[in-house]
Image (cartoon, rainbow, N blue to C red):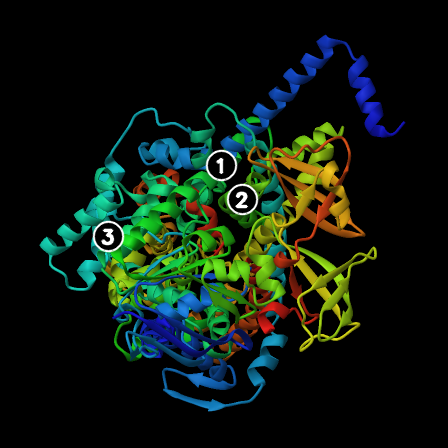
């Protein structure tokens, strides 16, 4: 069993508290991604799980056993570092063999494991090389191989793809997902890249300033972000936010008014909202509906476009409405004429409303 | 028009011939300066080499010649009869002994300083101590050290000299190795720790091999340092049979004023190992000498 | 967590600390104690006499002269070495055929033992048979008493120090020059600056740190000067070249004036500490950048 349980985990360096109390349950075999902006404490949290940093408070259990005071090497984990941390003076084979030797595994068994890992990662031809002689992607695979041969209960990845170029990153992403299915081990993966989080995770843990903002499957977080931070962090291009005010709020319906005077009827939030509350309306660029001339009577407002990027499959247009900058994703067939104005409709069912403290009304309901 | 523009204008209107003349004379000046400098630094060394092979009549003369007119090995013969090899051996023992001890202790200390967290910035205090010891004039502690060596019966012994040389070599090694240990990425050692390597295994399998170039460079510097050391040898060695080479030279200067052939013979023989390293350690020289190697 | 094991830390550090304590701290304490005592090693007795040694020291014309000689030596030698080092480094900061061989040749002197250097130069300075007087004779100049003329001897010793240690200041400055990205001086050239202007307004200000380092190191080193003086002049003629280190040596090991020599040692130690702290702040400051 290799489930993981974090209880009220805190970590401070000198007087600065980096992790401010994290509770988390990770099930056996799950692929968990810690994501957040730099400095949010995600790497520190991973290092405390690895045992590279002491806890300041709280408890970490792996497989039902408290490991707070157990040496990093004895926790049944293996870690892949951001810089790969390959032993530069050892060959690829010896890089993988070192950990096995240190753990008293005999030569025959370790040769078997290394051979197996090398096959999975297509390293067979490179076993005699030194890390210097490898490309970035190959080094990355060696680092993963070094973790695999240890046959750990839990794999920890600390931003392992951040040193690769974009193309290789996509390739490795797929390989890692495949590896997870194959090994069926618990994996914890740290990244600042929300695309990696969305594509690889069973569950995403969004961190900010040493606290968990939200935990859930990628789609859950995408569809029902608990607050404005999560909403803005996940999804690309980013969610648009428009300032708005609640103008009516009774038992029947709630109405909000956008700058420029447009009013919208939204589901009733009478329990949490009051007339006059300033709120933020969030809408993803691909949820905004662009209308062509024939439909323009349905429009809620017009966006003034100043830059548009044609990506082939779709077009991303950057513009503004009543001093609020907005991004809209257009279908490739949409005729973006010389006009710099697009009429759009706000589909109410896709709007997210956030109170002034950032919490989502939808989630609070 | 500012001076810059003036110069530019003048250059532009100057005839082409003058320009290339200017170039030529500039590169002539450059080479003249270069040759002058090289001559200044190399001539005494060349004279040392040449004189070691000269007949005495060629240097004890009112018209001394720079190059020998005939080569002789008599000075080397005389030196060997005088016990040169014994002193060479002494120097080798002291230099390698002191270096081995300092490299080991220095590496451990440097590692601790780089990797461990010290309470209350004690690491800075320790470093400052190391620095002050390295930079203080050795003569300052000569009197108490003399008493100390006398008390433990190590006066006039090579082992005693190895011990007091730690005063120079240990701070030097700590300071040099500090930089090299710092260059070993922390993550590599963490990876080894996760691979279940304990501290000794990490030092042996990971940190030492990665610091090897640094250890070699530091060892060479430390060897040279001990090889050339004079004041402590002068103060703590008394029997001529336990002399090191610098002390041998000093004795020679005062006792045999103009036995230059033999003197330069010692100089040449004792410098060969050091000069051979000159090209090899060039790239580490700055790091080494910025610690004040002497 | 891996690096918080107090036992490991102690075991790693104790041997070095022990050695430093026995061979550095303990002697420093000891010499400080001696400086307040009258010590007679032969009779194996000593007693406390307060500041008497320090009073004697400051009244001692030999000591004040040695301070003056040391300061003069230190300043003149360091400054010359730094200036020559800069000039040499500028020469070497461009490519020319044979540079690969010229560099080791330039640095030979500082690799040699000070005693070897002194032996060579002592021979060169010889009044009757030395090369210097021989060459001077060829151009018709009277022979010179290089080491026995009281007003010249110190400068003769300085010349040897310049010969031996200019290579070091040269290397430090050269490292500085080579750390300047080429495009900066190219940019200045494009802006219309000539070579001299690039040197004065761009290059030299950028290697100020290296120049200061070289100056500081040479000052610290020349402050200790002992070997060279011992081997070339033994402090003479009279006490014209006696430096502080030589003073301590003569009083401590020749005249057995342990108290006086110790007081002089403490005096030197104080200066060395002050210089070390300047150096440390510079080094640590550079590292924190």
Q: Residue A251's x, y, as percent?
A: 71, 75
Task: Name the residue that disc number 2 marks.
Answer: C166
Crowding around mark 2 (Cα neighbors within 10 Å: few <14, some 14 to 19, many 20+) is: many
Crowding around mark 3 (Cα neighbors within 10 Å: few <14, some 14 to 19, many 20+) is: many
Describe the element under mark 2 as helix, strand or loop: helix
User: In the image as oriented, which residue stretches furthest toward the right?
Assistant: B1
Q: Do tag 2 and tag 1 residues touch (Cβ < 8 Å)?
A: yes
Quarter of the image that includes the N terminus of chain A = bottom left
Residue at 69 percent across and 53 percent down: it is A346
Disc sitting over residue C80 in the figure: none
Between the residue at mark 3 and the residue at mark 1, the CA separation in whole angstroms equals: 53 Å
Task: Name the residue that disc number 1 marks.
Answer: B41
- Image check: A245 left or right of C263? right
Task: Name the residue that disc number 3 marks.
Answer: A96
Describe the element under mark 1 as helix, strand or loop: helix
Residue at 32 percent across and 38 percent down: it is A133
């Amino acid at each position: 069993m290799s489930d993981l349980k974090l209880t009220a985990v805190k970590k401070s360096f000198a007087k600065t508290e980096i992790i401010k109390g994290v509770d988390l349950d990770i099930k056996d075999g799950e692929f968990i991604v810690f994501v957040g902006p730099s400095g949010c404490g995600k790497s520190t949290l991973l290092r405390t799980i690895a045992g590279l940093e002491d806890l300041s408070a709280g408890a970490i259990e792996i497989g039902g056993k408290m490991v707070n005071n157990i040496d990093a090497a004895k926790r049944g984990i293996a870690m892949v570092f951001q810089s790969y941390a390959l032993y530069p003076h050892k060959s690829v084979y010896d890089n993988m063999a070192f950990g096995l030797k240190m753990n008293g595994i005999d030569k025959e068994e370790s040769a078997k494991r290394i051979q197996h890992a090398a096959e999975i990662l297509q390293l067979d031809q490179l076993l005699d090389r030194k890390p210097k002689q490898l490309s970035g992607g190959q080094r990355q695979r060696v680092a993963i191989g070094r973790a695999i041969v240890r046959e750990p209960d839990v794999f920890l990845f600390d931003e392992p793809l951040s040193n690769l170029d974009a193309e290789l990153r996509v390739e490795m992403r797929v390989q890692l997902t495949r590896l997870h299915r194959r090994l069926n081990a618990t994996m914890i993966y740290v990244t600042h890249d929300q695309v990696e989080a969305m594509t690889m995770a069973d569950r995403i843990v969004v961190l900010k300033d040493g606290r968990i903002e939200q935990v859930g499957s990628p789609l859950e977080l995408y569809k029902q972000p608990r607050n404005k931070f999560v909403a803005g962090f996940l999804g690309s291009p980013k969610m648009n936010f428009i300032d708005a005010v609640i103008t009516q709020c009774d038992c029947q319906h709630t109405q909000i008014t956008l700058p420029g005077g447009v009013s919208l009827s939204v589901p009733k939030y009478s329990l949490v909202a009051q007339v006059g509350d300033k709120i933020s309306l969030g809408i993803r660029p691909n949820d905004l509906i662009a209308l062509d001339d024939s439909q323009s009577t349905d429009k809620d407002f017009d966006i003034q476009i100043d830059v548009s990027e044609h990506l082939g499959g779709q077009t991303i247009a950057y513009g503004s409405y009543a001093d609020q900058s907005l991004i809209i994703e257009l279908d490739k067939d949409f005729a973006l004429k010389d006009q710099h104005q697009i009429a759009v409709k706000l589909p109410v069912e896709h709007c997210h409303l956030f109170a002034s403290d950032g919490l989502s009304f939808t989630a609070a309901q | 028009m500012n001076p810059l523009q003036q110069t530019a204008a003048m250059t532009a209107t100057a005839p082409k011939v003058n320009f290339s003349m200017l170039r030529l004379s500039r590169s002539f000046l450059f080479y003249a300066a270069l040759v002058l400098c090289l001559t200044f630094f190399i001539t005494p060394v060349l004279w040392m080499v040449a004189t070691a092979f000269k007949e005495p009549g060629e240097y004890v003369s009112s018209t001394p010649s720079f190059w020998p007119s005939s080569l002789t090995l008599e000075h080397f013969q005389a030196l060997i009869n005088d016990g040169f090899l014994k002193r060479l051996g002494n120097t080798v023992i002291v230099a390698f002994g002191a270096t081995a001890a300092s490299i080991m202790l220095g590496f451990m200390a440097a590692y601790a300083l780089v990797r461990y967290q010290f309470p209350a910035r004690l690491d800075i205090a320790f470093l400052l101590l190391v620095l002050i010891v390295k930079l203080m004039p050795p003569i300052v502690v000569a009197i108490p050290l003399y008493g100390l060596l006398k008390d433990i019966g190590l006066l006039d012994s090579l082992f005693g000299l190895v011990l007091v040389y730690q005063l120079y070599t240990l701070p030097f090694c700590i300071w040099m190795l500090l930089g090299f240990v710092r260059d070993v990425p922390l993550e590599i050692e963490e990876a080894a720790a996760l691979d279940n390597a304990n501290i000794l295994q990490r030092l042996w399998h990971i940190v030492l091999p990665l610091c090897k170039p640094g250890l070699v460079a530091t060892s060479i510097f430390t060897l040279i340092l001990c090889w050339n050391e004079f004041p402590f040898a002068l103060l703590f060695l008394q029997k001529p049979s336990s002399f090191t080479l610098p002390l041998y030279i000093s004795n020679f200067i005062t006792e045999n004023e103009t036995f230059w052939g033999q003197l330069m013979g010692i100089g040449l023989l004792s410098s060969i190992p050091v000069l051979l390293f000159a090209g090899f350690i060039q790239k580490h020289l700055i790091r080494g000498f910025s610690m004040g190697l002497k | 967590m891996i690096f918080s094991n107090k036992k490991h830390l102690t075991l790693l550090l104790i041997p070095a600390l022990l050695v430093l304590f026995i061979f550095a701290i303990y002697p420093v304490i000891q010499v400080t104690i001696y400086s307040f005592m009258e010590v007679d090693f032969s009779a194996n007795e000593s007693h406390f006499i307060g500041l008497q040694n320090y009073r004697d020291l400051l009244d001692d014309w030999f000591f004040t002269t040695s301070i003056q000689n040391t300061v003069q030596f230190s300043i003149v030698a360091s400054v010359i070495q730094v200036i020559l080092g800069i000039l040499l480094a500028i020469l070497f900061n461009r490519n020319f055929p044979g540079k690969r061989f010229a560099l080791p040749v330039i640095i030979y002197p500082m690799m040699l033992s000070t005693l070897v250097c002194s032996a060579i130069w002592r021979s060169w300075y010889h009044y009757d048979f030395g090369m210097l007087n021989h060459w001077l004779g060829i151009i018709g100049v009277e022979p010179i008493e290089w080491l026995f003329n009281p007003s010249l001897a110190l400068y003769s010793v300085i010349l040897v120090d310049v010969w031996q240690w200019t290579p070091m200041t040269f290397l430090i400055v050269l490292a500085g020059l080579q750390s300047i990205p080429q495009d900066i001086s190219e940019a200045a050239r494009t802006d219309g600056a000539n070579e001299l202007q690039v040197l004065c307004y761009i290059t030299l200000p950028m290697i100020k740190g290296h120049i200061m380092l070289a100056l500081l190191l040479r000052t610290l080193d020349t402050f200790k000067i002992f070997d060279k003086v011992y081997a070339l002049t033994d402090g003479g003629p009279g006490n014209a070249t006696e430096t502080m280190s030589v003073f301590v040596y003569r009083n401590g090991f020749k005249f057995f004036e342990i108290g006086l020599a110790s007081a002089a040692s403490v005096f030197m130690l104080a200066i060395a500490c002050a210089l070390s702290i300047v150096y440390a702040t510079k080094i640590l400051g550079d590292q924190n950048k």
